[in-house]
Image (cartoon, rainbow, N blue to C red):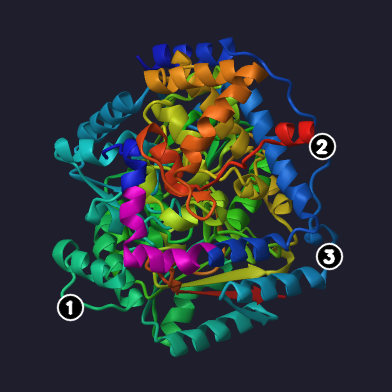
Amino acid sequence: MSSIVRNEILARLKAAPKVAIPPRPPKPKLHEHALTGEAVIEKFSKTLVEETGIVHRVKTPEEVLAKLAQIAVEEGLKKVMASNDDVIAPLNLKAWGEKNNIKVMVPKDYPDRNSYRDAVFDQADAGITGANFAVAESGSLGLAFHKDQARMVSLAPILHIAIVPVDRVLAYYEQGIKKIFGEKGKYPGQFVFITGPSMTGDIEGVLFKGMHGPRKVIVILIG
Amino acid sequence: MEIRTRQFKELAAKWMKDPAAAAFLRKGPYIMSAKRENALQTFPDIPEAQAYGAVIRAEAIARLPELLEEFEKNATANGANVIWVRDSKELNETIVRLIKERGAPYVTKGKSMVTEESGLNDVLEENGIEPFETDLGEFIAQLLKRPPFHIVGPAINVPRQEVCDIFMEKAGMKECTTDPVALGYAARLFLREKFHHVQVGITGVNVAVAETGTIINVENEGNIRFTKSSPKTQISVMSLEKVVPTMEDALHMLRLLCRNCTGQRLSSYISMDSGPKKEGEIDGPEELIIIIVDGGRTKIYQDVKSREALRCIRCAACLNICPVWRTVGGYAYGFAYSGPMGQVLNPLLLGLDETQDLYRATTLCGACKSVCPVGIDHPSMFLYYRSKDVLADPNFEAKPRPAMERQFFKGFAFAVNRSWFWNLGVKMARPFLNKKAENGVIRKMKGPFRGWFQSKDLPAMAKKTFHERWKEL
């Protein structure tokens, strides 16, 4: 049935008059094309702050844990859900949680979708994730989802804390996207750009944060 | 949803008197236009960036069949299930069937304009499936049973008291508040419960990438991410013109869309799906179903001029800048799309006869064209529709103009082609016309020309024409 419809639709499109494909001018310029080194990190931090994100920068993994402990106190965190990605796993957050009296949950603790959903929707005070990259252009985080990076850790809790090594901060989207979509057949099921907290202006145009997702996004840069 | 495009004048008159709509229209569109202007400043060369968007969309439309085949091939290779449907009826039936097969009692919906076109929500309800719109504005519009006032802020004109009342009645809110933040939070709690247990999620598609078989959604609230992450089944519906050639093209379109739409460099969440979740992932859909809808687009595609309308990326910059939309608001247009975007799209989707007033309710000032990031020439489209309407072109579902009007213009054409006849006519009309003049201006007229004088005045005719005076010199 669908293939009959498919062929019919495509046949109608192909039978229509053809027009010339317009020539492509050079790709548009971006200010970020010229950014390198420390300027990229500065631009990222400045832009994310404009999007009401919070940016901290520390030198070492130990300092990350100390910063996390400080945030946990400030935000009153009791239970957090953490990813197991290549930034977060080496930090051994379970041990950090025991030391700081915070329950650290990971999606792998749960046998199925429903029990995981109960935890991530109703229990986690914050979600802690790494990121594949961050982009100065718009102060965005880029996260590709996979077995160690579950989708709702950065979405369901009211606070999202992302930890990003500075060498992953890029100037513009294309630099990061070519890594994610570089190899055919190896694309992630989903990839997201996260730019600041969840927000809306749908009631009389009054802007507020935390509509469905996090009300606050904190990025800790390492390095 | 009832199509009310024939009632443009009544609806416009009604909503221009609505104090809440008027209060929003006095400021809202100007603020949104200013935000857009401001966001565009982040491009080193604004015209270059906008023009490149037009070239991408023009190429996408020119290569449409080939790009759709490429998209389908790659999406299928990614593990998505691609289904094609002809029209609204087939779309609604397909979605109902898919949901029933999966036994879901309700669905959460991310904003999808093509299901707005098809009236999917009504059909779901008829079939015992509860649809929950989850974008805050769409949620309010759904509860109030209203069409979108603005494509980006569907209920932005609704006063907070009214939001409170409807939330108390239908969204389980216990205590009334007129604090927009508290109202938003009440909606968050209500819909969070739905996201938590949802089995099937339905979304639209902003951009489809042929090169990678990826679909992309743009949003600020996170409702689309929930709808694509929590349930086992994701159904994403796209009208067939959404495709662009490459991922790099998609990135440029995202830059343009977010700036032109909400004045953001990038909206809070851009999510890109290439197939369902992978082995070992605990959330994300086990099956990704992409429905490609014709919905009248292949017909539009037959005409190379009409086809330009398919470039539209629904940014709504044209609404915010339009002197007509800024006055009458979104309900007057009587369908899913309002403003210049709706005046271009609705006549093609619904036929020229059904949408008479839409392509006439324009000053032809071209403000819409000047902001369009994909190079649509709205005024020329309106003139094109008018010409097709007068010619009663059956391909555009136009019907012949009223007999009296046709006779009048036949007579008029005869007269203006013959100077003697014209001069005679002028002489005969002068005393008749000038009798109606007050202080040298004719303000109203009875009979068939009544309508023309509703919004225009005619200066009284001079005692002698230029030609007559010339002869006397």
Q: Are marks 1 and 2 in contact (CB under 8 Å)?
A: no
Q: Residues within 10 Å of mark 1 (few under 14, many from 20)?
A: few
Can residue B283 be spotted in the picture?
A: no
In terms of depth relative to the viewer, which is nearer, A201 or B1? B1
Q: Label 2 belongs to which residue?
A: B473
- For discs 2 and 3, the disc positioned in front in the rendered view: 2
Q: Label 3 belongs to which residue?
A: A36
Residue at image position (71%, 65%) is A136
In terms of depth relative to the viewer, which is nearer, A127 or B245? B245
Report the residue that reaches farthest toward the front: B472
Q: Is residue B121 above or below residue B150?
A: above
Residue type at mark 1 is Glu
Is residue A82 shown in magenta? no
- For discs 1 and 2, the disc positioned in front in the rendered view: 2
Q: Earlier in the sequence, mark 1 or mark 2?
A: 1
Please state the chain letter of the residue tagged with numbered disc 2 in the rendered image. B
Residue at image position (39%, 58%) is A108
Please state, as top left, top right, bottom left or bottom right, where the N terminus of chain A lies in the image. Answer: top left
Q: Are marks 3 and 1 in contact (CB under 8 Å)?
A: no
Work out how far the residue at label 3 is from the one at label 1, CA to CA, in angstroms.
53 Å
